Image (cartoon, rainbow, N blue to C red):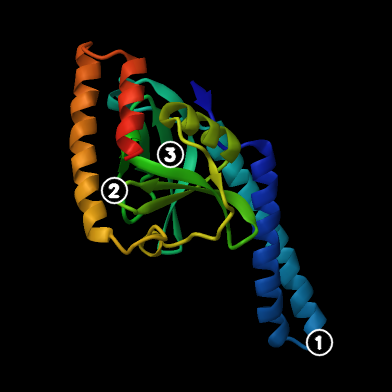
Amino acid sequence: MKNLGLSSGSIIWYSIFAGLFFGIFMGIFWGLGSTPFSIGFNNGLFSGFLFGTTMGLFMFFLKKKPIDIPKEIEKEGVIAFGQAGNIKNSEVRGGNLFLTKRGLHWISHGLNFQNESIIIESIQINNFGSFSRFSFIPDGLFVELLSGLRISFAVSNRDEWLTEIHKITGKKINSNHVHFENSKDLKTENTTNSDQRDVNYGDKIKILEELYELKNSGALSEEEFQAEKKKILSK
């Protein structure tokens, strides 16, 4: 079981980014209302430094705080876990991501207004990979479902997450580094046969669910299950 939560490098990166962003914004805002401009701008930069330091300390607290693994998720066999934000409509909602032998679980923390959870079974995953938020923050991870919907996360230790997801799905990592933000805009490129794709998707899910039950009952071995799953998903 791997803890892929916030690393020291991530804390430093987020502290610097938050400090620069807030500092420049406040510097310009205060500078426009000050004479001379430089006094307000310098005060804003100083505020940004304090803000970045505070964010760093907050993330350090999150890193040290143990992540509680729900019992129902623990029963599935947890492979990796860590802090992760779900990217939805340009908003990053904080929470925890768990990778089990069955798939991905994302659970929102109590500070969010929207506290719904996300469950992605491995048999639903058609494609997955990495991207850079705002074209330069290299922490984006997306999962594309057979339906064409993409669900995006902001994570630390992204390469390790990708490696572990590859192990349970057997699919190649798509590291296209495209800027993805809104899941509703992230449909597959080929949409000319969307109606037929939806039908095929439903059929595949039904068959895969039956295979999954056969594997759990012992009628199929893990190797046989993976082989049959590969055949179905390749159709």
Query: Quarter-wise, where is residue 231 in the image?
Result: top left
**CA gap, disc 3 and disc 1:** 46 Å
On the image, the x and y values in percent for residue 136 come to: 65, 58
- Closest to the observer, 185 or 76: 185
Q: Is residue 230 visible?
A: yes
Q: Circle 2 — which element?
A: loop
- Please give the name of the residue rendered at 48% of the width and 20% of the height, measured from the top-left corner: 1
Q: Is residue 66 visible?
A: no
In the displayed structure image, the side of residue 15 where residue 227 appears, left or right: left
Amino acid type, callout 1: Pro
Q: Which mark is residue 51?
A: none
Amino acid type, callout 3: Asn
- Read off the residue under disc 1: 36
- Closest to the observer, 203 or 85: 203
On the image, the x and y values in percent for residue 25 come to: 65, 73
- Please give the name of the residue rendered at 49% of the width and 59% of the height, measured from the top-left corner: 180
On the image, the x and y values in percent for residue 156 come to: 57, 41
Q: Residues within 10 Å of mark 2 (few under 14, many from 20)?
A: few
Position of residue 120 relative to residue 112, above or below, is above
Which sits earlier in the primary sequence, circle 2 or circle 1? 1
Q: Which mark is residue 116?
A: 2
Query: Quarter-wise, where is residue 26 in the image?
Result: bottom right
- Closest to the observer, 30 or 162: 162
Q: Residues within 10 Å of mark 1 (few under 14, many from 20)?
A: few
Position of residue 109 relative to residue 39, above or below, is above
In the displayed structure image, the side of residue 48 where residue 79 appears, left or right: left
On the image, the x and y values in percent for residue 131 come to: 56, 52
Q: Which mark is residue 96?
A: 3
